[in-house]
Image (cartoon, helix red, strand yellow):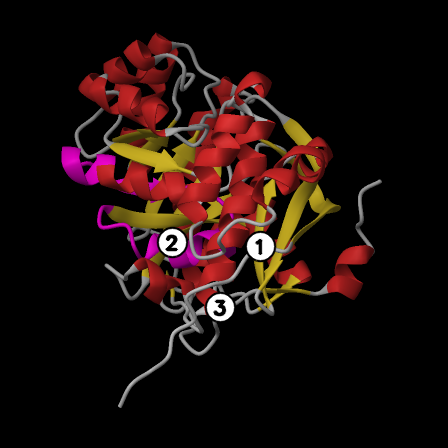
Amino acid sequence: MSTTVRAEAAVEELEVAAYTVPTDQPEADGTLAWDSTTIVVVHAHGGGETGLGYTYADVSTAKLVESKLAGIVIGRDAFAPQAAWEKMVEQTRNLGRPGITSMAIAAVDTALWDLKARTLGLPLCKLLGMAHERVPVYGSGGFTAYSDDRLAEQLSGWVEQGIPRVKMKVGSEPERDPERVKVARTAIGPNARLFVDANGAYARKQALDLAGRFADDARVSWFEEPVSSEDLEGLRLLRDQAPAGMEIAAGEYGDDAPYFRRMIEAGAVDVLQADVTRCGGITELLRVGALCRAHNLPLSLHCGPAIHLHPATALEQLVHLEYFHDHVRIEHMLFDGVAEPVDGDLVPDLERPGNGLELKRSEAERYAAS
């Protein structure tokens, strides 16, 4: 028995739109506060199929896709997303790679990989090759804008749902943080893992002091960005001197493979983080995964659980994926096919082609950004 596989298809059109969704409550971390989140959604059309990708970014990212990247990608082989990626990077050299350029490339790249998988009639995870059948998640939120009661309610709710690890934000009021982590520990009980994320809000010695207090008072086992992710020496100091059993993590702002290589070579983290919507898409995320494999370093994925789920299964060094409150809410509002955690894991639906997501266009239009 033989199977005919399509060998040719071209990208015929890129469609892009931005949607701004208000938060359900004011949100803040150690260095920022916000009351809405913008998602930029790309559809890549070709060969009778449509691929979907997106990034969380400013509306200007959508304009860049429309004005620059569409002209680069249209007409290219829909079965060669890596070649389109290389051309996008080459042709945006003078725009600067970090920031919205990398996020715009990410949205297009994830859409192109999805288009390829759908054209072949495969779930994206099968196309990429599955190293894992399930993806562990950690509940993430615990914003510094929350009251202690709301903090306890949200974190304990995830544990009750079967998610055995949760993360909270710290850093807005350092003097209150030790008490807040105690509130969190009491709420989630003795067995769940407790993570904290300072978003680079602390100074080096301040972070080191708080690391000890967090470990002693609340058994915090993960300290994310205790200092700025640009301070590789500071991260190394924390990694070397933090309490045993506490992992230091960073990397979510990485925009290309050399960024992650520098962080690894500096010995800055116990666990590297990456975000497919910021680092240039699936094409570059797979390279980050290879770096982690080469250095035997764990890899955790940052935010956007629905867009990360399928590529996460292909990463051998994966330890978990962030189930971020703000993005989980948006993804359930705007897309069909979003997976729900089961016993603390997300599992891709192998009956749906591509990444399994479909934009709810009528719902999304309510939030269309001007």
**x and y, in percent, of residue 334 in the image:** 67, 60
Left of 254 or right of it: where is 236?
left
Left of 229 or right of it: where is 45?
right
Q: Amino acid at mark 1?
A: Val
Residue picked out by circle 3: 119
Number of numbered callouts drawn: 3
What is the secondary structure assignment of the residue under circle 1? loop
> Can you tell which of label 1 and label 2 is closer to the viewer?
1
What is the secondary structure assignment of the residue under circle 2? helix
Residue picked out by circle 2: 311
> Which residues lie in the magenta part?
291-317
In percent of the image, x 39 and y 49: which residue is there?
Answer: 321
What is the quadrant of the N terminus in the image?
A: bottom left
Distance, label 1 to label 3, CA atoms, is: 11 Å
Kindly give the residue lying farthest to the bottom in the view shown: 1
Residue 292 in the magenta stretch? The answer is yes
Left of 232 or right of it: where is 95?
right
What is the quadrant of the C terminus in the image?
A: top right
Is residue 11 placed above or below 151 in the rendered structure?
below
Residue picked out by circle 1: 11
In percent of the image, x 42 and y 27: which residue is there?
Answer: 178
Is residue 267 placed above or below 343 in the rendered structure?
above
